[in-house]
Image (spheres, rainbow, N blue to C red):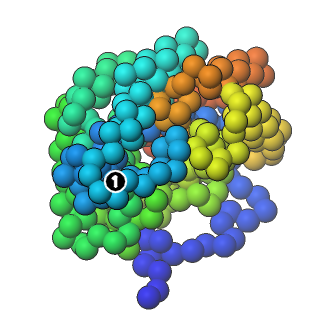
């Protein structure tokens, strides 16, 4: 099987000299904070799913019957962790992108409305918290449509950004761009800058995501034990990008999960990072939709 053009590999990328994205205000780093909303969309036989999810704060697979322990871990996110993160973002006047599963917002539409009212972006994280690589074309079209409709019902508007949990299918990007009107996706991990792909003769933005500056490091077998581990990792990344911006400004993605970084023992890591960036300066904190649109206009030569 060959790579479809939407996912063609490009080992050279921008090469030794990256383009200057001219971030607003002369910022050196565009910082994208992504809040992943997944509670209620994880696989659980209690919800009629075919199997249970096996990874949360511990590795454990319940093969027969509901996993109420798993549900409780995920439920900490909207019940407590979400508010802790939102209050911190408001303290620093930061707008984020919330990557939301459709089934999550079906079950808690209040959270989608709250995000919109606070000025954050609601993007799409599929319907359930699952990869798409095994889905048929027909099934994937149904899943994407169901996720989009759930977000529209909760938020009053359709999402324009997408991120698959794990691997997309050979059809995902084409379906998003041509059939559902998405402007960008984050199903890539291959650069420190966005880049364009032409899909159906229209420019489509790829917004690379990152797993290093991501609180997934607190999950079982991860690299973070203390809040300071997360802070140090993110601070180091920002400082390097800040220094490189002397000749080539870049983008930085920070992935957050209310059930992980939202714990009292971990939230200080995010606070310490934000305080460091505030003190150092040179950051443009922006929603992914805003970064994608700025980059598209800048790259196409239109006035931003």
Q: Which residue is rendered at x = 81% and y = 41% of the image?
A: 240
Residue 264 sits above or below residue 22 on the image: above
Name the spot of residue 89 as percent of width and height, x first.
Answer: 53, 19
Q: Residues within 10 Å of mark 1 (few under 14, many from 20)?
A: many
Q: What element carries label 1?
A: loop
Quarter of the view holding residue 137: bottom left
Q: Which residue is rendered at x = 35% and y = 50% of the image?
A: 129
- Tally of numbered tags: 1
Name the spot of residue 120 as percent of width and height, x first.
Answer: 40, 27
Residue 300 in view: no
Q: Which residue is rendered at x = 42% and y = 55% of the image?
A: 61
Name the spot of residue 149 as percent of width and height, x first.
Answer: 17, 44
Residue that lies at the very extreme toward the top in this rendered image: 91
Q: Which residue is rendered at x = 22% and y = 34% of the image?
A: 107
Residue 252 sits above or below residue 11 on the image: above
> In screen coordinates, is 213 left or right of 236?
left
> What residue is pinned by disc 1?
52
Name the spot of residue 33 as percent of width and height, x first.
Answer: 54, 34
């Amino acid at each position: 099987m060959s790579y479809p053009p939407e996912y063609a590999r490009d080992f050279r990328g921008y090469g030794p000299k990256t383009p200057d994205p001219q971030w607003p205000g002369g910022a050196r780093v565009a910082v994208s904070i992504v809040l992943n909303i997944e509670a209620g969309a994880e696989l659980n036989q209690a919800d009629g799913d075919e199997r249970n999810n096996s990874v949360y704060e511990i590795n454990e697979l319940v093969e027969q019957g509901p996993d109420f322990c798993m549900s409780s871990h995920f439920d900490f996110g909207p019940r407590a962790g979400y508010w802790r993160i939102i209050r911190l973002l408001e303290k620093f006047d930061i707008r984020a992108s919330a990557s939301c599963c459709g089934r999550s917002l079906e079950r808690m539409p209040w959270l989608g409305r709250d995000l919109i009212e606070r000025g954050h972006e609601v993007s799409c994280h599929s319907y359930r918290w699952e990869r798409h690589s095994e889905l048929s074309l027909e099934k994937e079209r149904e899943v994407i449509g169901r996720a989009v409709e759930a977000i529209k019902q909760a938020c009053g508007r359709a999402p324009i950004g997408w991120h698959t949990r794990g691997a997309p299918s050979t059809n995902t990007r084409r379906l998003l761009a041509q059939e559902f009107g998405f402007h960008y996706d984050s199903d890539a991990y291959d650069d420190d800058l966005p880049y364009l792909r032409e899909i159906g003769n229209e420019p489509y933005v790829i917004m690379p995501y990152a797993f290093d500056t991501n609180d997934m490091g607190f999950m079982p077998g991860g690299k973070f034990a203390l809040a300071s581990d997360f802070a140090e990792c993110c601070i180091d990344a920002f400082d390097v990008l800040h220094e490189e911006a002397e000749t080539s400004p870049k983008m930085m993605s920070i992935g957050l999960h209310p059930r992980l970084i939202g714990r009292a023992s971990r939230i200080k890591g995010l606070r310490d990072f934000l305080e460091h960036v505030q003190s150092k300066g040179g950051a443009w904190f922006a929603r992914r939709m805003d970064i994608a649109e700025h980059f598209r206009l800048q790259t196409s030569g239109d006035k931003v």
